[in-house]
Image: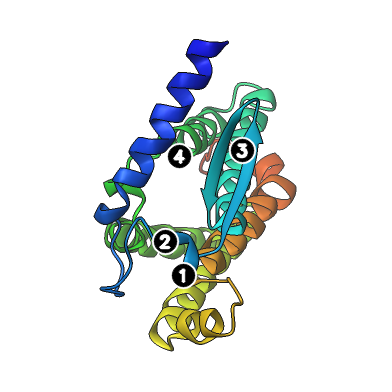
Amino acid sequence: MHLLLTKISKETSSYFRRLKSIEHDDPDLTPENWCLKQPCLKVRIARKEVTISQPLSSFWVYLLGFLTVGVGLYFFQIQNGENSRLWWGISLLLWGIVPVKFLITFDFMVWVSTPVFLFFCFSNAWRYFMFSYDMDLVLLGCWVVLFCTMMAYWIYDKLGITKKLWAKRIWFSENDVLHVLLIFWMIYIVVVVADRIKDYTLPVPSVP
């Protein structure tokens, strides 16, 4: 137990030593005054005191991660021989448990997802127009919700709303907007999309 607490203490200290690597636009922000300018929560684990920076933001991040993993596992549970559900489950599970820093930045997400996003929007719209499949309609709704999420983040960031709220000690940033809306997006996926996902097959015309 003592070794575990020592390891936690060392890890926590290393996090604070890496605070200088976090991008920000306040030149006066240092590890020493971090909690004077940022919301912090101190919790005690056994005999060790741990400081959590931006606890509400951390809550949204972990909630989104756990929810994403849960939705991915749900796709496995309802796979029922559908390969498309298997790939949905794999992609969501990897997204939830493999948070590589470079791969989860918003700019990189937009850069990678935009062509894929446009492809899926076009293909789902075309297939719904041609065959009126419910799956394509709910997937269009999925991409619309994701687009609205990205636009909300972009607008919130460009208008500088985070700085205005933080000046009033209201700790809700553009990242919180992104994570909260992604949580609703994930709920939409599990409630509306998941059970309608099926392997796509072209309809076979009847022979006269």
Residue 143 % position (x, y)? 52, 62
Q: Name the residue located 30 percent from the left edge and 44 percent from the top edge.
A: 17
Is the C-beta separation of discs 4 and 2 under 8 Å?
A: no
Q: Indicate which disc, 4 or 3, sits on the residue closer to the N terminus.
A: 3
The mark closer to the camera, 1 or 3, is: 1
Q: Which residue is mark 4?
A: 95
Residue 94 % position (x, y)? 44, 33
Q: Which residue is mark 2?
A: 34
Q: Nearer the viewer, residue 104 or 27?
A: 27
Crowd band around label 1 with a 10 angstrom C-alpha radius: few (<14), some (14–19), many (20+): some
| Amino acid marked by disc 4 | Trp
Structural distance between the alpha carbons of marks 4 and 2: 29 Å
State left or right for residue 16 relative to residue 59: left
The mark closer to the camera, 4 or 2, is: 2
Element assignment for label 2? helix
Q: Which residue is mark 1?
A: 37
Residue 57's place in the image compared with 86, above or below, is below
**Among the 4 quarters of the image, the one containing residue 33:** bottom left
Structural distance between the alpha carbons of marks 1 and 3: 29 Å
Structural distance between the alpha carbons of marks 1 and 2: 6 Å
Crowd band around label 2 with a 10 angstrom C-alpha radius: few (<14), some (14–19), many (20+): some
| Amino acid marked by disc 3 | Phe
| Amino acid marked by disc 1 | Lys
Q: Nearer the viewer, residue 50 or 96?
A: 50
Looking at the rendered image, the quarter that the C terminus falls into is: top right
Q: Indicate which disc, 1 or 3, sits on the residue closer to the N terminus.
A: 1
Structural distance between the alpha carbons of marks 3 and 2: 28 Å
Q: In this orientation, does residue 208 appear?
A: no
Element assignment for label 1? helix
Q: Name the residue located 43 percent from the left edge and 36 percent from the top edge.
A: 12
Residue 169 % position (x, y)? 59, 78
